[in-house]
Image (cartoon, rainbow, N blue to C red):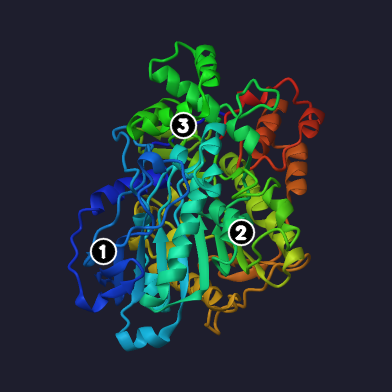
Amino acid sequence: MKKKFLLLGVAGIAVLAVLVKACTAHTASDASLRHLESGDVVGFEDKADTYAWLGIPFAKPPVGELRWRAPRSVEPWQGTLEALEHGNMCKQVPPIRWIDIIGDEDCLYLDVWSPRLTAEEIETSNLPVMVWIHGGANTLGTALATRSYNIAGSEQVIVVSLQYRLGILGWFSHPALRETAETPLDATGNFALLDMVAALQWVRENISAFGGDPGNVTIFGQSAGGFNVLALMASPPARGMFHKAISQSGNIQTVPQSMAENYVDDQDAGLSYSNREFINTLLIDDGRASDREAAKNIQNGMGNGELAAYLRGMPADKIFASVHRRGKNLGYFTPTNIRDGLVLPHEPVLELFRDPEKYNRVPVILGSNRDEYKFFLWENEDLTDTRLGVFTKVKDLDDYNRVTRYFSDGWRATGVNEPAAALQGSQPGEVFAYRFDWAGQKQSFLGNDMANLLGAAHGLENTFVFGPEAVSGLSQYAVAENGDSRRALEVAMRDYWTAFARTGQPGNGGNPELPVWQPWQDSGVNKLILDRGEASGIHMTSDHLDVAQLKERIRTDPAIRSSRERCELYARVFYHGLTRDFWSDAEYSAMGCSEYPLEGFEGII
């Protein structure tokens, strides 16, 4: 199953759009003056009757000796900080061929939106707080790709959007860093997760100055942001930092420490893109080694202090030039959310969720989009024809829907249904699941049949939660034939999300005309379908698809044309896919797949 590189992924489009929008000028509003622990800050009047504060630092810049260390408390400032422009986006390699490395290591900033409260209202409002974690495969993106004035203004909540170190700077596990740690948390490989914890600590200390309730904080995120939401539920340092969680198209993926850092030829083998293998590449690119074997010998011969100094002393662009050369799919791979026994326990997340004593138990919403993988497969040359890189036509719609459905159902089973079932046993009545089904795009966009080509694809629900004009890069895919129907679903989703943020129960979103969102249960109706009224509308349904059922479908589906295709599908969904927690060598062999090496089936994302 060949796959063309997707020129502009969700995060890539967002980054490009943000580069254009970043120059927008704002005028400070005296009424937005707020007094924080680290100093005074003033913002500006934004849309939907809100105030916005952009680019507030929540930690020291993680540069120089602070590279690959836990975030340090932000330095207080003198005078009044004008928070009118977004802070630097984090260093990254966007999947855009004509744009090189962008961003900055100095990127630990957050944005805040609130209703336009008076000083008297701030004293008594105690509004719920929602903290947004952006997506982008943990290697891409920026907080400003989604702007939160619609949620804050229409729903009367405080929204904080945070940034975190990305890719190789956000996640890096190696003995040299552990042995040279200055604090216990420096010994982790999950620096980006600690950035999120630091931002949540900032919220706890400062959000009351904006009228928010530090005792009612909901974390929510999409894609990699959803992965990180679930990781924070499993993270001991995050305990008590939030009170509810929403994972949009997230998953339970975490990586054992050995796979994250070991060489590929170690007895306990690491990933091909492990951190030791990356250092090999870095040494070759730096001219210190001629090949991998020489680089490995050099790396093994360097003391921990020498290697740590070498890594921290290298310019960030030089580091990212190396990851760029090894890049594929959404920019490049690096192991993220590493089970280091410190920031994340050694056990897989699903195991933790089965024991309420082993994770941060909070009410949770889990959801996925019906056609998640159409976004990643719509330029697959086996499934579609693309002319001039723009005009795409599906070759066989039935085949396209069948193949993309397997991957999308894999996301649904591993990222929603399996964790929901585990959590339901630990916290019954506090787990809610959804599936986003909206596919009301105009039939033609640049000649493309978007309703079938993308449908309810990955990322489109963000345009409903935040509003289409508030999400960079996706609005053109969410232009509906029926604007009123689209708007009704947008309002309903915001109502559900914020009702949950207020009470931990989404209910009917405060609208008696909407169905009550019932919690997950072992049998019967257990999932809310989110769709336009002229289609199936919003309703509860029964969806208990689990991994075992999906594997049986792959084993027995008569539409799969060959043994190789069956093996490839199984490998891509459960080995190269979102998580390997459900992979089985024995099952793969029993399917007659031993003749097909796993390395021959490249991952999708």
**Mark 2 — residue?**
233
Q: Quadrant of residue 470?
A: bottom left
Camera-near label (3 vs 2) is 3
Provide the residue designation for mark 1.
83
Residue 113 picture quarter: bottom left
Q: Which badge, 3 or 1, comes first in the chain's sequence? A: 1
The residue carrying mark 3 is 308
Q: Secondary structure at mark 3?
A: helix
Looking at the image, which residue is at 54% across and 53% down?
228
Label 1 secondary element:
loop
Q: From what the image shows, is residue 151 above or below residue 441? A: below
Q: Which is nearer the N-term, disc 3 or disc 2?
A: 2
Q: How far is disc 3 from disc 2 in space, using C-alphas?
A: 31 Å
If the image is split into quadrants, where does the N terminus sit? top right
Please tell me which of labels 2 and 1 falls first in the chain. 1
Q: Is residue 485 left or right of residue 296?
A: left
Position of 513 compared to 122: left or right?
A: right
